[in-house]
Amino acid sequence: MKNSLFLILASLSLSVWASPKVIYGEDNRRDVFEANPAYQKYAKSTLARIDRNYGLKGWTFNKMWELNTTTLLQDGVCADEAFSNQPTVAGCTAFLVSPKHIVTAGHCIGEQSCKVGLYYWLFDYQMPENGPFVNKRPKKNFVSCERIVKRVLDPKTHMDYTLIEIKKEVLNREPLRFRRSGKPSIGDELVVVGHPSGLPTKIADGAQIRDINDVFLTANLDTFGGNSGSPVINVNSGEVEGILVRGANDYVQDAEAGCKRSAHLSNDESYESATLITNIAELMDLD
């Protein structure tokens, strides 16, 4: 009972930090198999956060772990919205930066949730090109938190990131390359990879940096809750520039239809923010 209480409190304490996101201009989100082939390789090193209590069932001693999914439609999103019938289960996104380390947003995991094993992180949570989505996933595709190397969640500076050491080494995937010094420029083109609204991996390009300071950049990225922790990648260099952490409201209520619709803003309005990855000093020391 005590352990269960820790899990619930850890989950609630993180959820208050979760920030919504939105669509700018046209919706550029694509399933991995539909996306630009140049970007598809990034998805192989991206992970979905799965709550062990609510996101998994019948998993403990099996080689195949079953995801406990709903759909956006079941969660009150309008039927004619993109991806409304796809499964949703992910709480955040992370990405591989070394065979033993992943990076995510600071509000996606805390010391206590790591300690009690509240979350697993899943590779290859994607829609298939052909056939239905399969809820059962190989146990080997899940990793978990060994320790938090560094976590910052500062409401004053808006710094928001976590560097995690995972329990097992990942040998069959290439860590994402990331910027190690300097800053990107306003106007640089970006692509983001992650799990908007808990959906299977979506890749969204067509964004540009609108503003930048020493802590974060802002851009017109098509992202939602669930994208927190997503790698924000420079199209030209192929390097991660930042960690998606917050943005504008995801959905607006359609009173006439009785359901929720994606919020849309113009490309000139940019509220999606990503912590600059160069702020993680400990990451720069990894091999």
Image: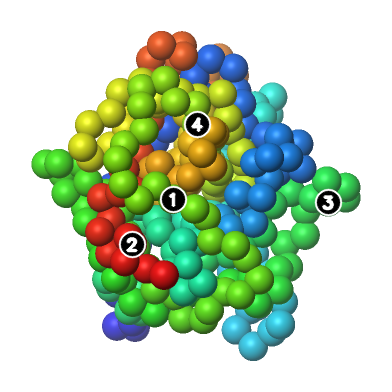
Dot 2 falls on a residue whose secondary structure is: helix
Q: Earlier in the sequence, mark 4 or mark 3?
A: 3
**Disc 4 or disc 3, which is closer to the eye?**
4
Q: CA distance from mark 2 to mark 4?
A: 21 Å
**Residue pointed to by mark 2:** 283
Considering the image in quadrants, where does the C terminus appear? Answer: bottom left
- Mark 2 touches mark 1? (CB < 8 Å): yes
**Residue under pointer 3:** 132
- Residue 222 visible in rendering: yes
Residue at the far left in the pictured view: 156
Q: How many C-alpha atoms fall within 10 Å of the one at disc 4: few (<14), some, or many (≥20)?
A: many
At label 2, the amino acid type is Leu
The residue under the point 54% across, 33% down is: 236
Name which residue type carries label 1.
Answer: Phe
- Residue identified by numbered label 1: 178
Type of the residue with mark 4: Leu
Of tags 4 and 1, the one toward the viewer is 1
Q: Residue furthest bottom?
A: 61
Residue at 49 percent across and 19 percent down: it is: 24
Q: Earlier in the sequence, mark 2 or mark 4?
A: 4
Closer to the camera, 250 or 192?
192
Residue at mark 4 to residue at mark 3: CA–CA distance: 30 Å
Location of mark 4 (residue): 190
Q: Position of residue 108 (x, y in %)?
A: 36, 56
In the image, is 200 to the left or to the right of 274? right
Compare residues 252 and 175 and report the one nearer the observer: 175
Amino acid type at circle 3 is Pro
Image-based side of 227 in relation to 78, left or right: left
Residue 68 in view? no
